[in-house]
Amino acid sequence: MRRVAQIIPLKRAQQWLTAAVVSLSFLGSISATVAHETDQYSVPLGREHADLRLFFARDVHGRLSNVIRTLNNRIDSTLVNGQPTT
């Protein structure tokens, strides 16, 4: 029993060390990243970005409505005389 108790903290320490190394290597690579021209793009004078709020709002609303309708139909198919089954 004593050996198992010693292995668990070592395993956790190894997991933390691995996570720290991965995190630090990721953070180190961010500073070396160079921005491309597309990242620095600005709209020419007299022009505006397209307003896509309504497009995305309708798309999300339609997808959520389909999910809700599907789930409600699945729930309704499991009911017997309007009562849940066990």
Image (cartoon, helix red, strand yellow):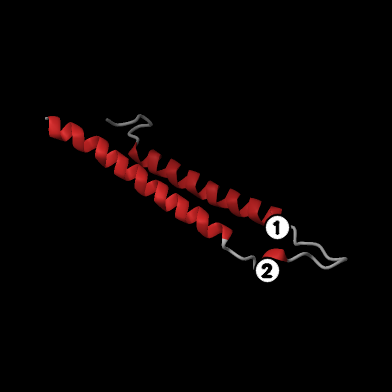
User: Label 1 crowding class (10 Å Cα cut-off): few <14, some 14-19, many 20+?
Assistant: few
User: Disc 1 on helix, strand or loop?
Assistant: loop
The C terminus is located in which quarter? Answer: top left
Q: Residue at x 26, y 35 (%)?
A: 9
Q: Residue at x 39, y 47 (%)?
A: 19
**Which mark lies nearer to you, 2 or 1?**
2
Image quadrant in which you'd find residue 8: top left
Q: Residue at x 32, y 44 (%)?
A: 15
User: Label 2 crowding class (10 Å Cα cut-off): few <14, some 14-19, many 20+?
Assistant: few
Instruction: Determine whether 60 is above or below 41 in the image.
Output: above
| Residue 38 image label | 2
Apparent side of residue 66 relative to residue 61 in the rendered image (left or right): left
The kind of residue tagged 2 is Thr
| Residue 64 image label | none
Label 1 belongs to which residue? 52
Q: Position of residue 12 (x, y in %)?
A: 29, 39
Q: Position of residue 52 (x, y in %)?
A: 70, 57
Apparent side of residue 33 relative to residue 52 in the rendered image (left or right): left
The kind of residue tagged 1 is Leu
Apparent side of residue 27 relative to residue 2 in the rendered image (left or right): right
Apparent side of residue 43 relative to residue 29 in the rendered image (left or right): right
User: Disc 2 on helix, strand or loop?
Assistant: helix
Image quadrant in which you'd find residue 32: bottom right
Specify the farthest residue to the left: 1
Q: Residue at x 34, y 30 (%)?
A: 84
Image quadrant in which you'd find residue 36: bottom right
The N terminus is located in which quarter? Answer: top left
Viewer-side residue, 40 vs 8: 8
